Image: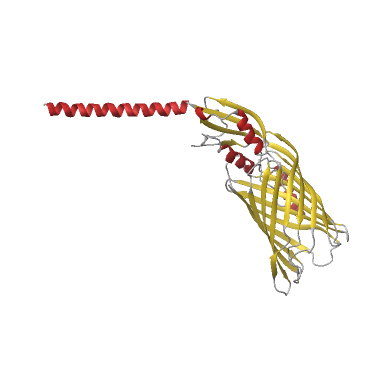
Amino acid sequence: MKKIFNNTAIFSFSILLLCLLFSSSVNAQTDTKKERVYIKIEIKGMACPYCAFGMEKELKKVAGVDNVEIELKEGLAYISTPISQKPTKESLEKIIIDGGFTVGTIEFSSSAFKRTKTKKKE
Amino acid sequence: MNRQLLTILLLAFTINVFAQGPPITTGTPVMLGLEGNGIRTFGKIISKENTNIYVQPIGIPYNISPKFQIGGILPFKFITPKRAETNGGIADVTLFTKYQLYKKDEKAKTFRVLANIKQSFPTGKTSSIPQIGSGIYQTYVGFIVGKISSAIGIYGDFGYNITSNGASDNFLYNFSVGVPLLPQKYPQKQINTFLEFNGNYVFNPKIHTLFISPGLQFIPGRRILFETSFQMPIVQNNISTNKTKYMLLLGTRFLIN
């Protein structure tokens, strides 16, 4: 009888532990998504694919950036970083100027910007 | 010939499409900024009445700053006269620098003016017949101008070439119109078409040559580009022998890093 009780207790405890782990993992993922900062950068003069390549390459070097999306026709670049690694406006401006282009507006947002193109899978 | 030219011109000016890569036989005013180094090489076949020439230059530009670029061109040249053996080797090495004098950037368009200085050295051998090098120092001082928008790219470069050892100076000029054939997206395959004009005016004796050069460029990915251009003479004044029949260029450019 005692053995059955012990087995049931161990089983119940394991299920509880799994539920807790799963729940914390989901929360962690949600928190990571929530804690990103989305940045839209207007890059004036970016009018050719090679220009876009240069900008993509430089923006990927920003800490926390794992994906850069370029809308060539609109002269826009989109990046996102964890909020803890949010770059300063000045550091982004320097990247654009060093790349040989002119900085337009730089917008920061807690939610992703709407695009005219289909979002590329990360 | 006139009908072909008209078709090319109509294609160049009526297709409403988007941005393009650098022109093929004309200088580009866009320098790719800090660390924007790339390599360009192409093979060029020059078919003359009595000679066939193959030139394979390798050009390596390096951006010191967003406004200032230096670079070098190492050309290999092979000359085959009619009923004679081919003679080839390293031709005249050129060092160049470009400096951005003016820039006006707007949304998906730019207008830029660059100063361009080139110095060629007589590194090609002149002891052989036919000779591979020019045997003279040449200093070129010129400008590169370009307006690139989301619909069309218009480029021009021109400059004065000062020669040594009593050779005649010359004035070189190139003009290019580029039109992309695919919608503007990045990254995406790009096909661009160019119509270019390449001129050279030698002062003493007075010799003027002008070529019309339709070209095609294919960009399959982020880092590499393939291009071809066919140059046909439309003016060859005061050249009595060994006139150029045509020139064919096949090349590639790729970005390192």
The tally of labels here is 0
Picture coordinates of residue A48, whole percent (x, y): 65, 41
Q: Residue at x 12, y 26 (%)?
A: A2
Q: Residue at x 25, y 29 (%)?
A: A14
- Residue found at the far left of this picture: A1
Give the colour scheme shown.
secondary structure
Please, is residue A60 above or below residue B57 in the view?
above
Residue B26: tell me if it is visible. Answer: no
Picture coordinates of residue B146, whole percent (x, y): 74, 43
Nearer to me, B182 or A87: A87
Quadrant housing residue B164: bottom right
Picture coordinates of residue B64, whole percent (x, y): 68, 44
Please, is residue A77 above or below residue B1 in the view?
above
Does residue A63 appear to the left or right of B122 in the view shown?
left
- Residue found at the far bottom of this picture: B83
Please, is residue B16 above or below residue B7 in the view?
above
Q: Residue at x 52, y 25 (%)?
A: A111
Quadrant housing residue B199: bottom right
Q: Quadrant of the N terminus of chain B?
A: bottom right
Q: Residue at x 30, y 27 (%)?
A: A19
Picture coordinates of residue A59, whole percent (x, y): 58, 37
Does residue A51 appear to the left or right of B247 in the view shown?
left
Residue B223: tell me if it is visible. Answer: yes
